[in-house]
Amino acid sequence: MTRLQVETWTWYSVTWLIVFARLSSRVMLLGSPKKLQSDDWIMMFAMACDTVLMVTINIVATTNSNLINPADHVVLTPEEISTRAYGSKMVLVVEQMQIAIVWSVKVCLLLMYNRLTMSLKQNWAVRFLSIYVIMGFIIMEVLYFGVWCRPFNQYWAVPPQNAQCSTAMHHLITNAVFNISSDIIMIMIPMPIFIQSQIPLKQKAVLCSVFALGIFTILSAILNKYYSFTDPYGASWTFWYIRESSTALIVSNLPLTWSLFRRVLNLTSLHGRSSHQTGSHHLTTAGYHSHVSHIQASCNRDDISEAGLRDISETNNSQEMINKNIPLKIYQKHEVKVTSQLATKEDIEAVNSAAITFQMHPNPAAKESWVPRNSDGGDSSSEKSAEGAVKAYNGV
């Protein structure tokens, strides 16, 4: 086997292992494969594209294309033209599969970010980045299919009439701008929450390793384009295509494998409690609401990593368990009826009398002294407010 084949299938095996762990963890968490969410299905689509990429990139590495080195003296026989046309088509497939994988990963991460920042101020940044990613993809593909190389079949013409049909320099520049910039923003969004979080040092170390893989993905994208520009006739770019797509897939799936690893290794969660631990808690009504508020705040602050290694839906499940164990009661029920009618002479005199009484008490604490009290200590008025009716008079 060639060096490229060894690296290709090594990355492919590791990637599938992580994806399988992610899907298993999600099924355990959600309860059924039917409950898998949109990002789970997008990830499976990305893995299908990765399978095609791994096969075609090995074909490209051993097959000539219409990218011909001027230093080479090539005799374009019909057989050579046919072979190079086939190799050029495989280059096109490789490029599109790479784009499909990278942008599918971006979508999956954005969906996860959106769930985790739903009630945080960072959510606006997630929405902005989502628009940027979608617009970048549309612009890049429109330029690739409709602008850089016309007519389209020149992409596999031997030799092509336009150098852009073989080198694709303009496309690679466009791809690099949108891809690398969006990756950098994607890493920066959770940084403030990660820095401010109060999770244990060990968990922070785990999250740092995930961020490091994300940085390596960006580095792979940079080197991928560097070798494509500086050594377009070599094979170095093929290695970095594989490394970029594989690390991107691993980074986007690792945060969602925590449920499985915690179950298998009997690990504790970010908050130091096993999912199997139970206990009894005696909470007052105020204590209960305070406890739930603390849980919700912890979810928003600490779980941004779902690299933390907890899916947001797991937190929701935990809160549902709390709700089951603590009975809730409604102690008061208020109903207010507001009506409007013309004021009578008696009503006007009553309001004026109340105003005079209020002016005689400059102390705000004493301003209620003019209001009659009923026998049980509740407020009452001439309009029978004890029955839950409030009247607003026009003309007073």
Image: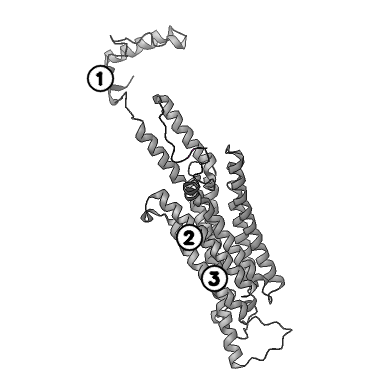
Name the disc covering residue 80, or none.
Answer: none
Q: Percent position (x, y) of residue 218?
A: 64, 58
Between 329 and 386, the one lying in front of the other is 329
Residue 351 falls left or right of residue 299: left
State if disc 1 and disc 2 touch (CB < 8 Å): no
Q: Amino acid at mark 2?
A: Met
Q: Which residues are magenta?
A: 271-275
Would residue 145 be visible to someone looking at this image? no
Horizontal side of residue 104 vs 177, given as left or right: left
Q: Secondary structure at mark 2?
A: helix
Residue at (71% x, 88% y) in the render? 73
Give the quadrant of residue 132.
Answer: bottom right
Q: Is residue 34 visible?
A: yes
What quarter of the picture does the N terminus occupy? bottom right
**Relative to 114, is 320 above or below?**
above
Which of discs 2 and 1 lies nearer the camera? The answer is 2
Q: Name the image quarter holding residue 369.
A: top left
Q: Position of residue 96 (x, y in %)?
A: 54, 70
In this figure, which residue is indicated by the disc labeled 1? 387
Name the amino acid, label 3.
Leu
Most common secondary structure along the magenta stretch? loop
Disc 3 designates what residue? 53
Is 270 contained in the magenta span?
no
Q: Compared to 306, does 11 lie above or below?
A: below
**Furthest residue to the bottom?**
77
Q: CA gap, disc 3 to disc 2? A: 15 Å
Residue 355, image x, y percentages? 38, 12
Pick whichever of labels 3 and 2 is earlier in the sequence: 2
Q: Which residue is mark 2?
A: 43
Between circles 3 and 1, the one closer to the viewer is: 3
